[in-house]
Amino acid sequence: MEERKRYKIVIAEPEDFSQAAEKKLMEKGQIIKGPFTTEELKSVSRDCDAMVLRLGHYIDRDFFKDTDLKFILTPTTGLDHIDCAAAERNNTDIISLQGHAGFLENIPSTAEHTWALLLALLRKIPAAASHVLEGNWDRDRFKSRNLNALTLGILGFGRVGRQISKYAEAFNMDYYFYDLAKTKKNHPRAVSTVDDLLKKSDILSIHIPLNKENENFLDQRKLNKLKTGALIINTSRGELIDENALVNSLLEGKVAGLATDVLAGELYPEKRRNSPLLSYARQHNAVIITPHIAGATLDSMQITEEFVVDEFLQRLSKQ
């Protein structure tokens, strides 16, 4: 493609999309805006050059059949909503936030939501609020603990894990972490094995990426290593936890509560409806589920959309 070409660009989920980013794209060509069903998006994208995508669709290998799509711009760190192997075979370039650690250090939304979930779960805030709306006022039902009396385990000490550790320090909370990176092994709060981390954790916060090797990473054996009565916070990916094993641990009282922003198979309505965690949450107050909103602040979304659009324009300028 030549720089003078007028491009066709799809914005799959345009609600609250950055006006600055959209203006830059309009200077390059025609903008086609959703919202679309996934089938509609597939049809619309066939003769387009680029697509801007959040997390509302799963782009599978069938999506890439008979398409001219050369770029997917996704302002996300995770790419499990795209079949990356199929994109590569189709010569579709994926522009995301992966690998841009310096830029991401200034994006706090996921860490902030993680801490909100932690406090909501520990202090039983959703259940207490519902209790009051039902006409009750029994404070003894909602006794909790002080954060500075508990130990936080941080699974993964990348950008979000480090941000969470700063919040723990601000709340005078003891914490430890486990991370694969050798450069972090000498940190005074690092532990040498996952089991060591689980045994220390009153609250476990998950911040590792999803890949084929760590699907169901937190399985029944690992869950059994947690302190009895531990709480789990997950703002990473639902597939990192064996959800059936987690429900068993909740039923047995090994795990006292879960606050999660993600579910396994969350992009598929049928899988989501049949989630064992969702079924459990309907009957128990000890589980809080939010719809993958950790990164969904207007500030962070617009900043990251502008970032991937700028990356896209840089790629075009080099062609």
Image (cartoon, helix red, strand yellow):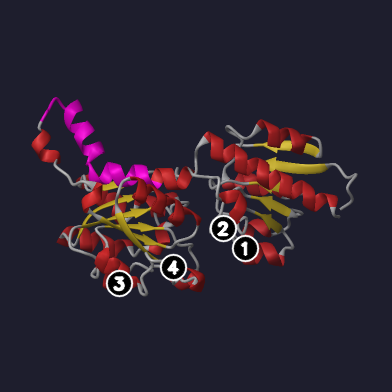
**Distance (Cα) linking label 4 and label 3:** 12 Å
- Residue 129: percent from the left, percent from the top? 22, 32
Q: Do the residues labelled 1 and 2 touch (CB within 8 Å)?
A: yes
The residue stretch that appears in magenta = 114-137
Kindly state the secondary structure of the residue where label 2 is placed: loop
- Of the image marks 4 and 1, the number of the one nearer the N terminus: 1
In the displayed structure, would residue 232 be above or below residue 114?
Answer: below
Q: Report the residue marked by disc 3.
A: 196
* Front of the two marks 3 and 2: 3
Q: In this view, does 162 lie to the left or right of 61?
A: left
- Of the image marks 4 and 3, the number of the one nearer the N terminus: 4
Q: Report the residue marked by disc 2.
A: 79
Q: Report the residue marked by disc 1.
A: 84
Kindly state the secondary structure of the residue where label 1 is placed: helix
Q: Report the residue marked by disc 4.
A: 179
Kindly state the secondary structure of the residue where label 3 is placed: helix
Q: Is residue 94 left or right of residue 185?
A: right
* Front of the two marks 4 and 1: 4
Q: Quick one: quadrant of the C terminus? A: bottom right
Image quarter of residue 121: top left
Looking at the picture, which amino acid does disc 4 mark? Asp
Looking at the picture, which amino acid does disc 1 mark? Cys
Q: Main secondary structure of the magenta part?
A: helix
